Amino acid sequence: MADRRYTAPVTAPSRGLADVVAASTAISDIDGAAGRLSYRGYDIHDLGGQVSFEETVHLLQRGTLPTQAELDGLVEQLASARALPPLAAKALPDIAAQAAPMEALRSLLSLVGHDDPDKDDNGAAANARKAVRLVGVMPTLVASYQAARTGGGVPDPDPSLGVAGNFLLQITGRTPEPEAVAAFDECLVLHADHTMNASTFAARVCAATLSDMHSAVVAAVATLKGPLHGGANEAVMRTLESIDGGVEAVPGAVSDILGSGAKIMGFGHRVYRTEDPRATHLRRLSESMGQLAGETKWYEMSIAMEQAVMAEKRLYPNVDFFAASVYRSLGIPTDLFTPVFAVSRMAGWTAHVMEQHADNRLIRPDSDYIGERDRRVVPLAQRG
């Protein structure tokens, strides 16, 4: 990664670093005006539904779509990384009894780092091994937390299933239908990376200090925990659930919510000026998964809400909006929607950490001081 250098001083600060180029990356790219997202040069519309999550992990972390032999090797490595390391396993019951999902994930992920044999090595080979192990263990962390807090057990993984299928198996306790596996796998691909979002930036800032990969992804999870970054998909589901009267009641509910000055989560985006390309796929998956589950009302209400928000605010749905109804139809508990996002995004976070470490420069932006100047200290006895 090569940072862009500027010779001219910045004369006006950008709130939230909007439009500020913080780094160069070869991992993903967005064209907000055209509504395009690509991973290493591949359009998300070409990847979604055609390339598995495991292939996407290889693409993001290693730079290429894998050959069959490379994919087989990666699948084996991911499978061997599923088991909870000792410290995380020991702490799980206490954490699950006291912590909300993202709090638990933050703590468990930190404990995972203590048992990693490469924890003190930021070299390329060690980082590559840690990156795969982190992607492999994330679904188990979420499923084990769910089992621990509900008093259930985690089914043994099925060697015939990949990341998506085994997560659904372990979170629901039943073997998922092939259509459900394919849909969830596509969701994981769609969420795997998204340029310099807040959690990815946090991971890169941490990595730029030459801290280790586990610390960097814990920083990312801690950032995703904030409601202005993560949690929108859960909020979408809560909003849909709060509307009595089904599809017919949606337009009135939207008017009431917007009229009160509140926002409806899942709409608009800091980058896209048209439809989020991921939402295009998720809208289709929302319909098909609703049909598979035998309950299409969440899809139908989502379509009604999309139309009502467009009519009143001219806002397009983002990735979180239709993801909510997809996850509900797949049997994923609502408060685990954001941890599921992290399961997928671990592929991108680890790729960015490796890129940062490979060509590092400490990330240290300037600030615009707006406080008082030239003040003088008055002795304590003379104050007041």
Image (cartoon, helix red, strand yellow):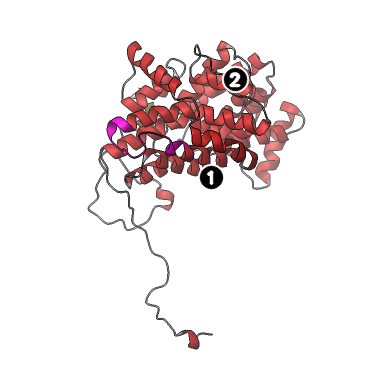
In front of the other: 309 or 188: 188
Residue at label 2?
155
Magenta stretch, overall SS: loop
Q: Residue at x 64, y 23 (%)?
A: 331
What kind of element bears circle 2?
loop
Image location of residue 279, percent across then percent down: 52, 27
295 magenta-colored = no
Q: Are marks 2 and 1 in contact (CB under 8 Å)?
A: no
Image location of residue 25, percent across then percent down: 31, 35
Image location of residue 112, percent across then percent down: 46, 36
In front of the other: 338 or 81: 81
Mark 2 vs mark 1, foreground winner is 2
Q: Earlier in the sequence, mark 2 or mark 1?
A: 2
Q: Residues within 10 Å of mark 1 (few under 14, many from 20)?
A: some
**Can see residue 67?**
no
Mark 2 to mark 1 CA distance (whole Å):
31 Å
Q: Give the extent of the magenta segment.
A: 112-126
Amino acid tagged 1: Gly
Amino acid tagged 2: Pro
Q: Residue at x 27, y 46 (%)?
A: 361
Q: Quadrant of the N terminus?
A: top left
115 magenta-colored = yes
Residue at the far right in the pictured view: 245
355 lies above or below 65: below
Q: Quadrant of the C terminus?
A: bottom right
**Can see residue 109?**
yes
In front of the other: 257 or 294: 294
> Position of 259 compared to 113: left or right?
right
Q: Residues within 10 Å of mark 2 (few under 14, many from 20)?
A: some
Locate residue 292: give its quadrant.
Answer: top right
Residue at label 1?
226
What kind of element bears circle 1?
loop
